[in-house]
Image (tube, rainbow, N blue to C red):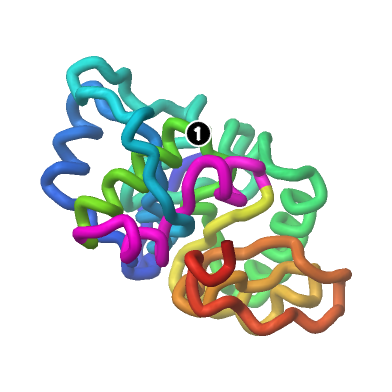
Amino acid sequence: MVRSRRSTVVAALAVTPLAVAVLAGACTAGGAADGKSGRAHDGGSDPARRMPVTRLTPLTEEDGYVPEGEGLEVSAEVPALERLDPELRAALREAAAAAEAEGVEVVVTSGWRSERYQRFLLDAAVTTYGSEEEAARWVATAEESSHVTGDAVDVGYTDAADWFSRFGSEFGLCQTYANELWHYELAVEPGGECPPPATDAAEGS
């Protein structure tokens, strides 16, 4: 169900020592760092909802958590996939089957996420980029994130993300942000023309 990535998309949001420390020991403030598929999407911080690391419980599969450097098979029966919008999940699996028929392996590096997972990712992005403004280009708030609502999915490996960028529209899947090759949402009818992607998550929010 979970595969280690070989030639994954380079993570746009680097894993900082702080992020590693948080994940390693009773981590999770929520936030959104799409490290998996290499993307971070969303922005905005809520300091009032942050908690000391020592009082947090670890992120788990129930949060939609996918360990850094790993990916899920599109058929995996886990919350990250089961809590996606049903139409998005069906389109994802249909597209993945078509890609794999052409020899392109597809994994999901991030799908549905809990609000606390999203908040953790956002906090990590603020630490990485040094400001909430810059973090917003890569990670959305839990209130604005399409991952939290189950309307977005990140795909890997790099060749799979490239395949989706070229053929995803045949299944209604469109790249949402120009700086996130791996991030897809169900945006048009199958075979339709995808709208130009927003420059980044801050513009698209």
Q: Which residue is mark 1?
A: 115
Which image quarter: residue 83? top right
Provide the residue span drawn in magenta.
Answer: 130-150
Determine whether the residue tagged by mark 1 lies in a helix, strand or loop.
helix
Q: Position of residue 104 (x, y in %)?
A: 56, 72
Which image quarter: residue 187? bottom right
Residue 11 appears anywhere in the view:
no
Relative placement, left or right, of 97 versus 16 is: right
Relative placement, left or right, of 116 versus 53 is: right
Relative placement, left or right, of 56 versus 71 is: left
Residue 193 colored magenta? no
Which image quarter: residue 128? bottom left
Q: Position of residue 146 (x, y in %)?
A: 61, 51
Amino acid under label 1?
Answer: Glu
Q: Residue at x 68, y 72 (%)?
A: 174
Q: Position of residue 175 (x, y in %)?
A: 61, 73
Vertical position of residue 62 compared to residue 97: above or below: above
- Circle 1: is it few (<14), some (14-19), or many (20+) Cα within 10 Å? many
Q: Residue at x 32, y 18 (%)?
A: 57
Number of residue marks: 1
Main SS of the magenta segment? loop
Vertical position of residue 121 compared to residue 174: above or below: above
Q: Residue at x 55, y 64 (%)?
A: 183
Q: Residue at x 75, y 53 (%)?
A: 88
Quadrant for the C terminus in the image: bottom right
Q: Position of residue 68 (x, y in %)?
A: 32, 48
Give whichever of 11, 119 is nearer the camera.
119
Give whichever of 32, 172 is nearer the camera.
32
